[in-house]
Image (cartoon, rainbow, N blue to C red):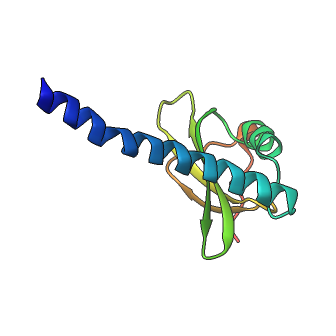
Amino acid sequence: MRRAFLCSLLALPLGATAAEASRRDHERARDALAAGEIRPLSELLAEVESRYEGRVIETELDRDDGQWIYEFKLLPPSGRVFELKLDARTGTLLRSKGPVLLRGGAPLPEPR
């Protein structure tokens, strides 16, 4: 019993640290939006869902070598998940991975 209690006490800081990190990430994203470094997620989400076939199932915002990047994972009707990485400031497609499906049969834009 005492061992279980001590283990639970050791786990508490880890949960608090994860919550704090999540809060910091949220604040960084909000600050980047306020500074005009990124576009609102809602705008890019609407563009992605109108341009590509499938439903967005996961979204991440990362900073890579000073550049903000939105990563979207989509699940199309085929069931084969694909990933898009967009410049968070411009919405330009940087990379794609997997079987990307466009709505309306248009060709996939070339990454820049």
Q: Residue 18 location, x and y as percent? A: 47, 45
Residue 62 vs residue 11: left or right? right
One can see residue 91 in this view: no
Q: Residue 20 location, x and y as percent? A: 54, 47
In the displayed image of the protein, which residue is found farthest to the bottom? Answer: 65
Q: Residue 47 location, x and y as percent? A: 80, 43
At x 78%, y 57%, the residue is: 31
Residue 6 vs residue 74: left or right? left
Task: Work out which quarter of the rendered image holds the N terminus and state it.
Answer: top left
Residue 45 vs residue 2: left or right? right
Q: Is residue 14 above or below residue 6?
A: below
Picture quarter containing residue 76? top right
In the displayed image of the protein, which residue is found farthest to the top? Answer: 1
Q: Residue 41 location, x and y as percent? A: 76, 45
At x 82%, y 54%, the residue is: 39
At x 66%, y 36%, the residue is: 53
At x 82%, y 62%, the residue is: 90
One can see residue 50 in this view: yes
In this orientation, which residue lies closer to the viewer: 85 or 36?
36
Task: Work out which quarter of the rendered image holds the C terminus and state it.
Answer: bottom right
Query: How many labels sit on residues?
Result: 0
In this orientation, which residue lies closer to the viewer: 110 or 25?
25
